[in-house]
Amino acid sequence: MAKQTKKQKMLAEKLDAEKLYGFDEALQTLRDLQTAKFDQTLEVAMNLGVDPRHADQQVRGMVSLPAGTGKTVKVAVFARGDNADKALEAGADKVGAEDLMEDMQAGNLDYDRVIATPDMMGVVGRLGKVLGPKGLMPNPKLGTVTPNVAQAVKDAKGGQVQYRVEKAGIIHSGIGKLSFSDDDLKANFNAFVDAVIKAKPSGAKGKYVQKISVSSSMGPGLKIDTAEVQGA
């Protein structure tokens, strides 16, 4: 890690682990503390009052971030014929059928999103043990099994992110780069949090959003005051 300046050391020493920040203040603090030479990602984590072991307490979905993610997303598409051509035109990195399945079975899984047309699920289904653990298995509820593969590719490339609650009831995602403007990062933060709040499952009891924190790739986690988050 790069050496901290006197100002950064002073700020780091003053950080209160229990302080609740407004988003704007938290973002400025993370900017002031950054020492890395690369463009760090702003990440958000949400602790939810759910137990993912129960089917009625699952939280999973997609959200399009207004300002994008700043990340290059690699997309593979299972399709044939015209759909394959449309996927390529939309910017898919790899398109195929049985050949793509065999490639993935051989361990070539360097993709951020896998999309399939409904008629290809017989082929894709054989990759359950390969794609499932990586969260890449196409799913109609997430829009990754669709006849409109061109739109799905454009959405994936244009800033759509997937979220899924983990065992401890936590959801986390990158929501942009620190080089983004304050307004763009706040718009992305609001869009992500709003999507998770709207995805509240029927089985959730008590307080749903228990804690929200933001951090940079190399920075500390700062707690956000949920009182300023609508619906939390």
Image (cartoon, helix red, strand yellow):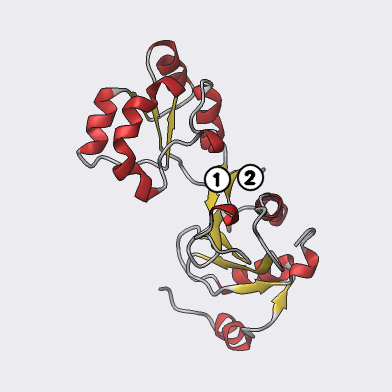
Q: Residue at x 74, y 68 (%)?
A: 226
Q: Which residue is drawn at 64% across and 85% down?
A: 16
Residue at which label 2 appears: 65
Q: Amino acid type of disc 1?
A: Val
Helix, strand or loop at label 1? It is: strand
Q: What residue is drawn where x is 78% and y is 58%?
A: 231
Identified by mark 2, the residue type is Leu
x 34%, y 42%: residue: 131
Q: Mark 1 packing: few (<14 Cα in 10 Å), some, or many (20+)?
A: many
Q: Where is residue 166 in the image (x, y as percent from the top left)?
A: 49, 60
Query: In the drawing, does residue 231 fall left or right of residue 54?
Result: right
Name the disc covering residue 161, or none.
1
Quarter assignment of residue 142: top right
- In this picture, residue 134 sits left or right of residue 13: left
Residues at circles 1 and 2 in contact by the CB criterion of under 8 Å: yes
Closer to the camera in the image, 90 or 81? 81
Which label sits in the foreground, 1 or 2? 1
The residue nearer to you, when weighing 146 against 73, is 146
